[in-house]
Image: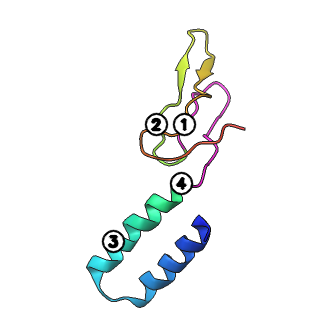
Amino acid sequence: MEITDAIIILSEFKTITENYIMQDALNIAINALEKQIPQKPKIESWSPALCPTCEKELSESVGDGYYKHWYSMKICECGQKLKWE
C-alpha cells in the first residue's frame, strides 16, 4: 500500500466516524503520513529557502543578498521530507 492510499482510506474513515477523539487521532495520522511525501522547499529569488510545511528557513545568508541552501538536509525539523530537485 502506498502512503497516498493510506491517506485516502484514513480520510474516508474520518468522514464516517462521529467520535471526535477518533477524528483527532486520524488527523494526526494523516498529517504524519503527508509529511512522509517529499516536497520541494519554497524558494523565491533573494529569499531563503523555506520548508513547505512549517516555513522554517532552510538556508543561510552569505551576506551579499544571496543564500546558501542546505541541499544536504533531507528532513526538516518538523518532520517534512524534502526534495531539492
Residue depicted at 56% across the width and 9% down the height: 63
- Which residue was labeled with disc 1? 50
Circles 1, 4 touching at the beta carbon (< 8 Å): no
Quarter of the rendering containing residue 23? bottom left
* CA separation in Å, label 2 and label 3: 25 Å
Circles 2, 1 touching at the beta carbon (< 8 Å): yes
1 or 4: tag closer to the N-terminus: 4
- Which residue was labeled with disc 4? 36
Magenta stretch: helix, strand or loop mostly: loop
- Magenta stretch? 37-51
Quarter occupied by the C terminus: top right
- Asked whether residue 29 is drawn in magenta, I would say no
- Which residue was labeled with disc 3? 25
2 or 4: tag closer to the N-terminus: 4
Circles 4, 3 touching at the beta carbon (< 8 Å): no
* CA separation in Å, label 2 and label 4: 17 Å
Along the line of sight, which residue is nearer the eye, 84 or 67?
84
Q: Position of residue 69 (x, y in %)?
A: 60, 25
2 or 3: tag closer to the N-terminus: 3
The answer to whether residue 24 is left or right of residue 32 is left
Disc 2 or disc 4, which is closer to the eye? Answer: 4
